[in-house]
Amino acid sequence: MTEFGIRPPRVAVLSSAPHGGAGIAARRLADALAAEGVAADFIDIAGIGESVPEDARPSRSFSNRTISDAHFTVEYPGFCRGWLVEMLADYDIVNVHWALGLIALEELAALARRGVRLVFTLHDFHYVTGGCHYPATCTHLGLGCHACPQLDRGLAPLTVPPRARRFKAALFAHPNVALTAPSHFVRDGAVASRIVPADRAHVIRNAYRPLKASAAPRDPGLVRLVLIADSLSERRKNMRLALESLAVLAARLKGREGPRLVVDLVGAGDPETATLMARTGLEAVAHGRIANHAVLTDIYRRADLLLTPSLEDNWPNILVEAGVYGVYPIVGPGHGCEEFVRAFGFGSVAAAYDAASFADALDGAMPPAARRMRGEAAAAIREAHAPARIAAQFMRTVAPGLAGAPAAPAVSLLSASGSWT
């Protein structure tokens, strides 16, 4: 690995693809670092031209779909491309986001052994578990992932999760390996797993620069609610509950005076989702899946409310992207979405994961008075995720004193930092 000199520090930001929540966050961090004078390269599978082979890291999920149907990743040890290790070892920092299929565990271990500053940015729990991406109700993580309740035993033996967990524990045992996460929920869960010391686990929010300076004028006769729902298939996202809650709310609103509720439904045209949306009786605009962020920005700028009932989540991009325009979130309790609401004092947390509780939270958010402080919250959310702030915090946290790193602005109380050891 090269020594730091007067040249700008070199950072490789790794993600399997530039799409999806983790890939978007990774690309935004790379851009933020580059804007502050860091030589940051975003590297994905397309960039290196090949992926980890299927027999080493199968792409299918090994979940038994009992307590959760979130993806379960199995990786078999031993695969290592020397050329990739050599290429990445020339960077001062290698920042690994959701990079499954891009870089194998053995390749990461090789970098750690060479003393590369290796920083994992966790967008879920995979890099500290035996294979699951979210633990759901499982409490085996701190016990080494033995007797894993999420593994399909017809696809892999029960020895696979604890072996993967031991490999990751050995990886994080290197003092030059650390992790960050955008939420305390994930960061604290990683520390509780005993896989990484607290002083090498940090909260750094995702960088975001809004495309537009302010929200669009709202129609006082309408309340626009954004629901981003590709399908009803993943139980963790809990979109069926969202639609059931809207149906309960719609029944309450019948005959009531006040603004009309309109739902902006963003996501692929899943037939079952469309059917359940129609049953609510609410007016809905189906936008389909949106790849162009400018188009999604225009939807956020007109919106009043955002509904996301995930059972588990980190620090979703959609909360930040909508929040910078003062869109009021309604979320479920107990994870990173509630953390977002508490951090900014803006939004409503449903009392429980049932339709009546979410309908209560939605109903309470309908009057404009319930969404006061919209402008103050939007400004705070922008400040907390400003790319210059996040770039400086990242470099200050993972490589203090590094020559050429961006100067650190004042630290917001809405973010957390730590020191490298």
Image (tube, rainbow, N blue to C red):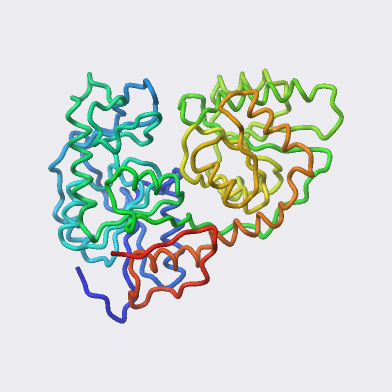
Q: Quadrant of residue 174?
A: bottom left
In the rendered image, the vertical position of residue 351 relative to residue 300, given as above or below: above
Q: Quadrant of residue 136?
A: top left
In the displayed structure, does residue 406 sit left or right of residue 211? left
**Residue at image x 46%, y 45%?**
21
User: The N terminus lies in which quarter of the figure?
Assistant: bottom left
- The answer to which of 390 and 281 lies nearer the viewer is 390
Residue 194 seen in this snapshot? yes
Q: Where residue 50 sits in the image (x, y, percent)?
A: 25, 46
In the displayed structure, does residue 333 sit left or right of residue 189? right
- The answer to which of 203 and 89 lies nearer the viewer is 203
Judged from this view, the residue extending furthest toward the bottom is: 6
User: The C terminus lies in which quarter of the figure?
Assistant: bottom left
Residue 43 seen in this snapshot? no
In the rendered image, the vertical position of residue 190 relative to residue 354, given as above or below: below
In the rendered image, the vertical position of residue 63 relative to residue 207, given as above or below: above
- The answer to which of 185 and 241 lies nearer the viewer is 185
In the rendered image, the vertical position of residue 279 relative to residue 198, given as above or below: above
**Residue at image x 32%, y 40%?**
126
Q: Where residue 397 sits in the image (x, y, percent)?
A: 38, 65
